[in-house]
Amino acid sequence: MSKPPAAILIVEDEGVIALDIRHTLERLGYRVCGVAARGGEAIEKARSLRPGLVLMDVHLQGAVDGIEAAAEIQRRLRIPVIYLTAYADAATVARARLTEPFGYVLKPFEEKELHVAIEMALYRHEMDRRLEESERWLAATLKSIGESVIATDADWRIRFMNPAAELLTGWESSQAAGRDLADVVRVSIPLKPRAVESGDLPGGGGVARGVLVTRDGKEVSVEERSTLIRDEDGAVIGIVIALRDLGEKIRKARGT
């Protein structure tokens, strides 16, 4: 089953140019869902039509120019925007760059150039959407599991704690975020950690048992399993730690 053609909103205040762009897009196989001549109109049409992409002229007549309109569309609706404009001066480009556009095509343009810019923007937007979806699934999964999970960045600062980790350590995730791992996960390990077996976990890491001191000073026997996270070049970019409350395990075994 083939995908339907991408719907594109044209924002251009010169009618003849807007018509020419429409014909070009239709020749390329896209569907033009609307045309707007003012920034405010572009925002309203983007909200009501929900196009897959917006082609935005930078200099529009009226109170809201193209850059302001693009910023609002991306902030509110997360719709990719390509600037299609005759202006390439340093000040305009600098303003446009702050809105993180998906492309910047100068008029007059070649049909092939516009086609490539649109396809690249649609592809990038789809990849961003899939990544965000995967991250939401991962976050939801980590929050739902019973084991305490904590993640840090390359400088060992807390980036994520699931509810089980909050309960075990006594730290709320929002309060722990950005703090050094050692300030939040205070574990004394009497014996040398056991290295993770080859192939057991990706990236390397270790397993150890020790005593966790919670935020309110309580001591809890835990097993700590750490996994290094590496980039494609092998550099460590963070660590994920899973903590298991051994005291709870012992109490369950004793039936207390």
Image (cartoon, rainbow, N blue to C red):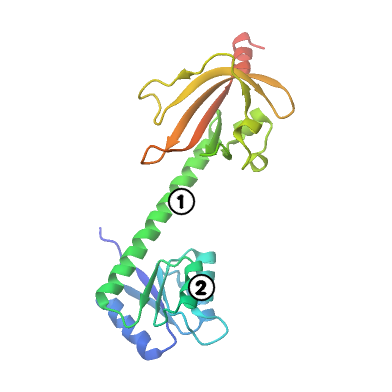
- Please state which of residues 31 and 1 is positioned toward the viewer in this rendering: 31
Left or right position of 2 against 144: left
Q: Quadrant of the N terminus?
A: bottom left
Left or right position of 123 against 221: left
Secondary structure of residue under mark 2: helix
- Please state which of residues 40 and 49 is positioned toward the viewer in this rendering: 40
Q: Amino acid at mark 2?
A: Arg
- At horizontal 33% and vertical 74% (from top left) the residue drawn is 31
Query: Which residue does the numbered mark 1 point to in the structure image?
Result: 132
Residue situated furthest right in the rendering = 216
Q: Position of residue 214 (x, y in %)?
A: 69, 26
- At horizontal 55% and vertical 13% (from top left) the residue drawn is 191
Report whether residue 28 is seen. no
Gap in angstroms between the C-alphas marked 2 and 1: 26 Å
Query: Which residue does the numbered mark 2 point to in the structure image?
Result: 95
Q: Quadrant of residue 246?
A: top right
Numbered circles on residues, count: 2
Residue situated furthest top in the rendering = 254
Residue situated furthest front in the rendering = 90
